[in-house]
Amino acid sequence: MTVASRPLAMAMVGGGPGSFIGPVHRMAAELDGAIRLRAGVFSRDHARSLTAAAGYGIDSDRAYPDVAAMLAAEAQRPDGIAFVAITTPNNTHLPIAAAALAAGVHVISDKPATATLGEALALQRHVAASNALYAMTYTYTGYPLVREARERVARGDLGRIRRVHVEYPQGWLADPVEHGDNKQAGWRTDPARTGVGGCISDIGVHALNLAEYVSGERIDHLLADLVAVVPGRRIDDDATLLLRFAGGARGFVAATQIAAGARNDLRLSIWGDRGGLQWSHADSQNLYLRWPDRPDEIVSAGGPWLGPFAAVATRLPAGHPEGFIEAFANIYRDFAGAIRTATPIAQTPLSGIEDGVRGLRFVDAALRSSAQGGTWQPVEETGRHN
């Protein structure tokens, strides 16, 4: 096997016992054979990190006690890591990414980019000063039919965009589970670890990213109502936003984590002056096109009718469902390709640091709006930068 064909060596920070997203990153990264998880700092507790390494099939000498030790040791190895995947709580993203970038190691990070807008802007400077690549896992952009929807909007099928609606109900925080042994709920509802936003930072940024990614329109103002519904919760668990787009479209995002009985029910609708489209995470294999003057269409994944952007993100023929892991894997496959070809992230389908900063601008504007009783706020305003 030549060096060029050898799988890229990946390190993961986070993803230890009790992690949800860490194992997802590992499965997705390795799905296509272009990447192998070889090292990591899987927990702040080194004993737990060793346990995780054993579960991942990683040699114990590559389960490190901290990021600095990992970067130093891997730099001395002929088979050292090519990139780091960050799957830790939000407040740790900046120091981990900054250290890797300074060492010339590529970075792919879970969202949001950082805990605050100020940190995101600092990270943007670190990315600009490094020759290493930085990408983010906005997972839903990896779905073939989300990419198909983007392509159809971009070529004008729907005409001028008028409305963009995104609903994202979850129910896993409908009760105060953070006071029990739910590790995920513990840190995601702790402002010290999750950052300045709760639901708005956790899933709201996904919804806002999806709205812009598919519509091709930029949100320039928003009005937000953020609330902590569960008594005693210190951070928002419910977010409702009205949106104004620079091109004249209007829309909304309704994201909540206290909808008892909801799972992960993300839904997108876009309406233009010629027609509309609808896509949902629960029915991710189908894209629904709505027309005023002819029958509606259902575009299914896996067929020859897909455009090239969606086709390359599809592994199986029509009728063989693909899902969350495969969408995540598309992001990792794109990232591996960018590393091998030294392609700037902006020239790939991937989300980069600009998208990360934009996500925190959404959060910052939403917090300002809600704190003022629901006023229209510009998304591009720099805000508090805390």
Image (cartoon, rainbow, N blue to C red):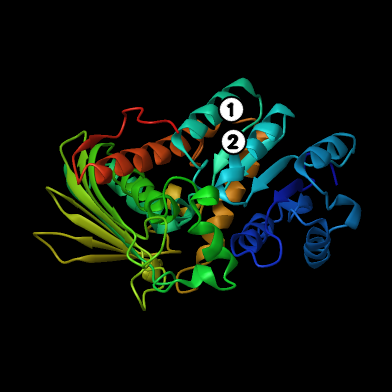
Asked which secondary structure carries label 2, the reply is strand
**Residue 240: x and y, percent?**
26, 55
Q: Residue at x 36, y 74 (%)?
A: 262
Work out whether mark 1 precedes mark 2 in sequence or the reverse, and give the earlier one: 1
For the residues labelled 1 and 2, the Cα–Cα distance comes to 7 Å
Q: Outermost residue, front direction? A: 232
Position of residue 324 in the picture relative to residue 278 (left or right): right
Q: Residues within 10 Å of mark 1 (few under 14, many from 20)?
A: many
Position of residue 95 in the picture relative to residue 210 (left or right): right
Quadrant location of the C terminus in the rendered image:
top left
- Kind of residue at disc 1: Val
Query: CB atoms at circles 1 and 2 under 8 Å apart?
Result: yes
Asked which secondary structure carries label 1, the reply is helix
**Residue 335: x and y, percent?**
60, 43
**Residue 73: x and y, percent?**
87, 39
- Kind of residue at disc 2: Tyr
> Which disc number belongs to residue 36?
none
Q: Residue at x 81, y 60 (%)?
A: 53
Please indicate, yes or no, whether residue 243 appears anywhere in the rendered image. Answer: yes
> Which disc number belongs to residue 134?
2
Residue topped by disc 1: 127
Q: Is residue 148 above or below residue 316?
A: above
Q: Is residue 67 above or below residue 24?
A: above
Position of residue 16 in the picture relative to residue 308 (left or right): right
Q: Residue at x 15, y 59 (%)?
A: 291
Position of residue 245 in the picture relative to residue 53 (left or right): left
Q: Residue at x 79, y 58 (%)?
A: 49
**Residue 190: x and y, percent?**
51, 55
Q: Quadrant of residue 91?
A: top right
Q: Residues within 10 Å of mark 2 (few under 14, many from 20)?
A: many
